[in-house]
Image (tube, rainbow, N blue to C red):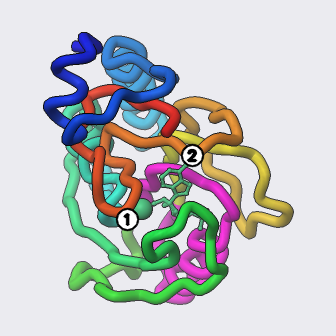
Amino acid sequence: MPRSAEVRARTGGQDVRKITYSEEDIAARVKAMGDEITGAYPQGDEVLVLGLLKGSFIFLADLVRHIARPVQVDFLVASSYGSGTVSSGEVKLVYDPDAEISGRHVLLVEDIVDSGNTMNRLIPMLEKRGPKSLEIVALLHKHIAPNLVKEPRWVGFDAPQEFLIGYGLDHSEKYRNLPFIASL
Ligand code: IMP
Ligand code: MG
């Protein structure tokens, strides 16, 4: 896909600076993570996959198709960024899942761990609801969060400290539909 005319058709005229992870790299990594996740849950056990909207929607859609366990899907909406590229530190829960968490295997799906604020706010809240297990899978991890309350058990890529877009990641709600991940 990265022919620049096609890229510009999706961005509204802009080129991207650098493709950080290609469509093929992402597909291979997501499949490998799905296989690892499958192996971590006993056969027959059900997993509640909780996607953190909006950034995780494409990753989650691809990932669940590689998890060979009974899966239920629900979503959380936390808002921390507004339209800037720097975290405000505020995390608001805008939508809370209907799904029962108590006694279930919960797998939280995050697009990218940056400051860690979102995870640090969500994990204690979910732990309080008494899941049987609680794990995090993050597509990208910038490894700059100073004190994460819980590290993701699975990470797709150790990301550069750049602002990344595509494959669900936005800047001011744009670029989510790029099939690869690029630096803005
Ligand atoms: P946190 O700083 O770890 O709380 O990250 C919160 C959210 O900010 C992530 O789930 C993303 O939606 C967004 N975010 C952080 N870094 C980036 C980036 O490089 N590109 C796009 N979104 C980002
Ligand atoms: Mg975002």
The image quadrant where one finds ligand 2 is bottom left
Please state, as top left, top right, bottom left or bottom right, where the N terminus lies in the image.
Answer: top left
Circle 2 SS class: loop
What residue is drawn where x is 22% and y is 84%? 98
Measuring from the top left, give residue 126's x and y in whole percent: 50, 80
Q: Nearer the viewer, residue 52 or 36?
A: 52
Measuring from the top left, give residue 69's x and y in whole percent: 25, 41
In the rendering, which numbered label is found on residue 52? 1
Give the residue at the far right of this rendering. 146
In the rendering, which numbered label is found on residue 163? 2
- Please tell me whether residue 168 is drawn above or below residue 131 in the rendered image: above
Q: CA distance from mark 2 to mark 1?
A: 18 Å
Left or right of 34? Residue 182 is right
Residue stretch rendered in magenta on the structure: 108-134
Measuring from the top left, give residue 143's x and y in whole percent: 75, 46
Q: Is mark 2 within 8 Å of ligand 1?
A: yes
Q: Residues within 10 Å of mark 2 (few under 14, many from 20)?
A: some
The label nearer to you, 2 versus 1, is 2
Q: Nearer the viewer, residue 50 or 95?
A: 95
In the rendering, which numbered label is found on residue 103? none
Circle 1 SS class: strand
Give the residue at the far front of this rendering. 13
Q: Is residue 130 magenta?
A: yes
